[in-house]
Amino acid sequence: QFDRGFNLQVLGNLDEALICHDEALRIDPFCGIALSHKGRTLAALSKKTEALECCDEALRIVPGNPVAYVNRGDVRCQLHELSGLVDYDKSIQLDPNYFIPYNNKGAAYYGQSRYSESLVYDNKAVELHPNGKSYHNKGRSLIALKRNEEALFCFEKATQSEPSRVDYWELRAQLLRKLGRIKEVVECY
């Protein structure tokens, strides 16, 4: 049930996801990962206090779970708590090859306009898992650092990796326009 709840949350069906998480917890009240994912869903529903309580409880149940630390880090960062960055570090410590805490810590630094620090984590995320999101995040950081040609390469990789992501294409087109490469802008639409 918690896998179904996670997938529903990713698709934006938050109320259904919450029902699945609750059903998983009814079956196994000590399922830490279900609690952790319920926390993410509650955060997406703007129920941040409840979300943090779920994530804290998940970590009491499964203290060595890197996913649970990422989820709590995400909630804490949404609450503008710097301790979210510490949670990402703990996740990295538990599993240095898990790309998501690098991706999310880079995004958190980007949100704080700390672009050089963001890029360090974006680079590691791309190294571990070169997907559309990791290239997108790296590209944003590079634009902020005025390294536009490198950013363009990242957006090309992002759109190749996930061609259905309209937001990736739009950023690529905006950057091409900024670089004066108008003929290539048309290819993005």
Image (tube, grey):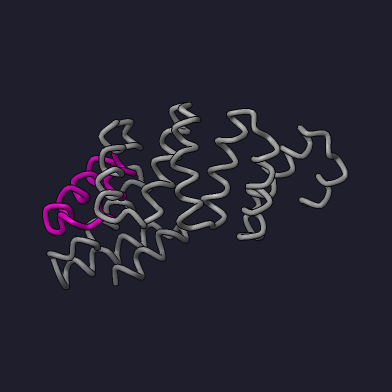
Q: Residue 123 or 166: which is nearer the viewer? A: 123
Q: Which residue is drawn at 50% across and 30% down?
A: 115
Q: Is the magenta stretch mostly helix, strand or loop?
A: helix
Picture coordinates of residue 28, whole percent (x, y): 15, 70
The x and y percentages for residue 151 are: 64, 40
- Position of residue 139 relative to residue 15, above or below, is above
Q: Camera-side residue: 95 or 17?
A: 95
Locate residue 152, reporting x and y percent: 69, 43
Question: Where's residue 163, x and y in %?
Answer: 66, 60
Residue 109 located left or right of residue 18 = right
> Which picture quadrant has residue 170?
top right
Does residue 47 show up?
Answer: no
Left or right of 50 on screen, residue 106: right
Q: Is residue 74 shown left or right of residue 61?
A: right
Q: Residue at x 57, y 47 (%)?
A: 136
| Residue 170 higher or lower than 146, as above or below | below
**Residue drawn at (27%, 51%), measured in percent from left and top?**
39
Hey, which residue is sitting farthest right in the picture? 183
The segment highlighted magenta reads 48-76
- Seen at 34% across and 44% down, the residue is 74
Among the 4 quarters of the image, the one containing residue 95: bottom left
Q: In which quarter of the image is the N terminus?
A: bottom left
Choose between 81 and 142: the one closer to the eye: 142
Left or right, 33 with respect to 184, comes to left
Count of number-bearing discs = 0
